[in-house]
Amino acid sequence: MRLRDLVTEPGSRKLSQRKLWTNVAYLVATVVVLWHAWTGQLTETVLVIYLAVVGGSALASKVIAARFGATPPTDPPEPR
C-alpha cells in the first residue's frame, strides 16, 4: 500500500474527500488517545469511545453498503 492510497480513489487515483477526511479524523482521534495515555489521563471511557468510533465507522460503512446494494471500496491489485 502506498501512502497516496489513503486519500485517492482506487482505479481513478483522484483525490477522495471521504478518504481524506476519514483518515484525518482517525489521525486526530489517535493522537488524542496517545496523548492521554502518555500523560497518564487515559480512562476506560476515553478508550471505549475511541474504539467504538474507529470500529463503529467501519461497521457502519459495511452495513450501509450491504443495505443499499453497493460494494464497499476495495484496493485494486498492485501493478507488477
Image (cartoon, rainbow, N blue to C red):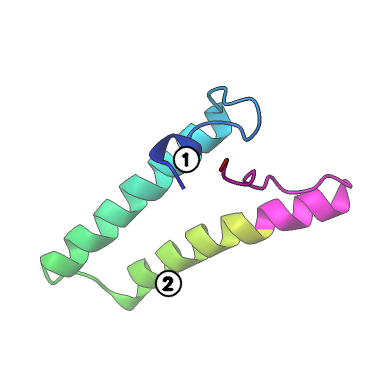
Q: Going by the picture, which residue comes out furthest to the bottom?
A: 44
Instruction: Return the residue nearer the eye: 50 or 79.
Output: 79
Residue 16 on image: x %, y %: 56, 28
Secondary structure at badge 2 equals helix
Residue drawn at 43 percent across, 42 percent down: 2
Question: Label 2 amino acid?
Answer: Val
Residue drawn at 13 percent across, 66 percent down: 38
Residue 72 on image: x %, y %: 73, 48
Residue drawn at 62 percent across, 35 percent down: 10
Against 65, residue 38 (above or below) is: below
Secondary structure at badge 1 equals helix
> First in sequence: mark 1 or mark 2?
1
Residue 41 on image: x %, y %: 17, 69
Toward which corner of the image does residue 33 lie, by quadrant? Answer: bottom left
Q: Nearer the viewer, mark 1 or mark 2?
A: 1
Residue 53 on image: x %, y %: 50, 58
Distance from label 1 to label 2 (Cα)?
Answer: 25 Å
Instruction: Return the residue nearer the eye: 59 or 49.
Output: 59
Instruction: Return the residue nearer the eye: 55 or 12.
Output: 12
Residue drawn at 83 percent across, 44 percent down: 70
Q: Is residue 35 left or right of residue 77?
A: left
Against 7, residue 46 (above or below) is: below
Question: Label 1 amino acid?
Answer: Leu
Q: Which residues fall within the magenta stretch?
A: 60-78
Q: Please tell me the numbered disc located at residue 6.
A: 1
- Please say whether residue 29 is one of the residues in the magenta stretch: no
Q: Mark 2 points at which residue?
A: 48
> Crowdedness of circle 2 by 10 Å Cα count: few (<14), some, many (20+)?
few
- Please say whether residue 66 is one of the residues in the magenta stretch: yes
